[in-house]
Amino acid sequence: MKKIKISLFLKVIIAIACGALLGLVAPDWVVRILKTFNVLFAQLLKFVVPLLILGLVTPAIANVGRGAGKMLLAVMAIAYLSTICAGFFTHISVSGLFPHYLTPGEMSADAMSAKEFKPFFDIKIPPVCDILTALVLSFMTGVGIIFTGSAALKKGFDEFGNIVKLTIEKAIIPLLPWYIMSMICEMGAKGVISMILGSGFKIILTGIVLSIIYLILQYGLACAIARKNPFTCLWNMLPAYLTAFSVCSSSAVIPVTSNCTRKNGVSDDIVDFTIPLCSAVHMCGSTIKLAASAIAVAYLSGSPLPFGVYASFVMMQGIAAVAAPGVMGGVLMASVGLLESIMGFSPDQTALVMTLYLALDGYGPACNVTGDGAIAIVIQKLFGKE
């Protein structure tokens, strides 16, 4: 019999359900075993994330130099601007929405510490460098490869990136559901699981609605520039949206996105250049999902984020997410370190953000690929005659 494959989304749902049930009946020693795994996996994440940035972002920046031109720079600039605008749009929106249906301080340290479970042991795995150092080094090395044409260095980072991808795909991603289950189990044992799941549903629903509104704004602006009907263009992109929602991947949906974009009057040359590039650099939907989850966790923890801190996170996250779609869960993995290094999140807060992010993963990639079509419309207007 063929091996039955279960999607990451379904695994996360199963992990949440098992963790919630186990937390209600498991003795303390079982919860402590899972807590030990939780702590060790968090250390592994801290170690891997800077390597992921070095291994994926550096080759991505170096590849920008191939065939570089005005159109390439325009796509990169528009994609990055769209990604960070999605983050600021989310901040403005949820700042007015969350106070109506979330309770500040509901997950504060005092509320969550009714009963503490300590790991049996704790091993520290110091990362090679911090996140900001990895980002700066990736940018410096990638740009350096472009100007020096160092094929050997480029090949080395490409191969290193393949090793990092293998580690993420074969070790980190398979263990993520267990990591989530261990966290949910501890919450169940503390008696706060119903509060977490109730708030989580509201946060996820908010993210879905915001992503749809952002797409309408995107296409409204793009079609105003190109003088097209935004709702017709959005309708033409519906197959790409639904496919990405189902498979939870931007890269895997490139053929569908390309066909939908052609229906909007974009030429083959523009489509073949813009859509594959945007699948690696345009992360508006993933940013909305991550930002909504992070802001909600900070709000529920009773420590709202200063706007300056949040702005730094969004700007860096837009860079860290470059080329991350090449790995399942790559955008989340590339952003985990920023949650702690810039926002000051604790490992428990970061784990909760990861749970909310993965609980309904599809709407992020769906928004990403649909937004790629809007960028293609703008590029067609700017460069179509050339």
Image (cartoon, rainbow, N blue to C red):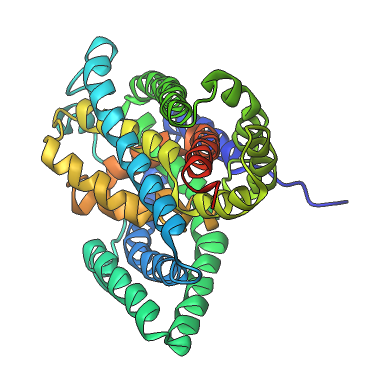
Task: Report the residue that reaches farthest toward the top.
Answer: 100
At a point 26% along the width and 33% down the height, the residue shown is 88
Q: Residue furthest front?
A: 385
- Residue 13 image position (x, y, % from top left): 55, 33
Judge left or right: residue 279 versus residue 238: left
Q: Nearer the viewer, residue 370 or 124?
A: 370
Splitting the image into 4 quarters, where does residue 169 fall? Answer: bottom right
Q: Where 131 sits versus 183, above or below?
A: below
Which sits in the foreground, 91 or 191? 91
Residue 214, position as x, y percentages in the image: 41, 26
Count the labels in the image.
Answer: 0
Q: Nearer the viewer, residue 385 or 51?
A: 385
Question: What residue lies at 50% left-to-right and 35% top-to-bottom?
Answer: 374
Q: Residue 286 at x, y = what percent?
A: 43, 40
Position above or below: 309 against 93: below
Left or right? Give the position of 70 relative to 312.
right
Judge whether residue 343 can be spotted in this image: no
Residue 70 place in picture, x, y as percent: 42, 58
**Residue drawn at point x = 44 percent, y = 20 percent:** 209
Residue 198 in view here: yes
Considering depth in this image, is 361 or 32 the residue closer to the camera?
361
* Residue 371 higher or lower than 175, as above or below: above
Answer left or right for 63 relative to 47.
Answer: right
The residue at 49%/54% (across/down) is: 280
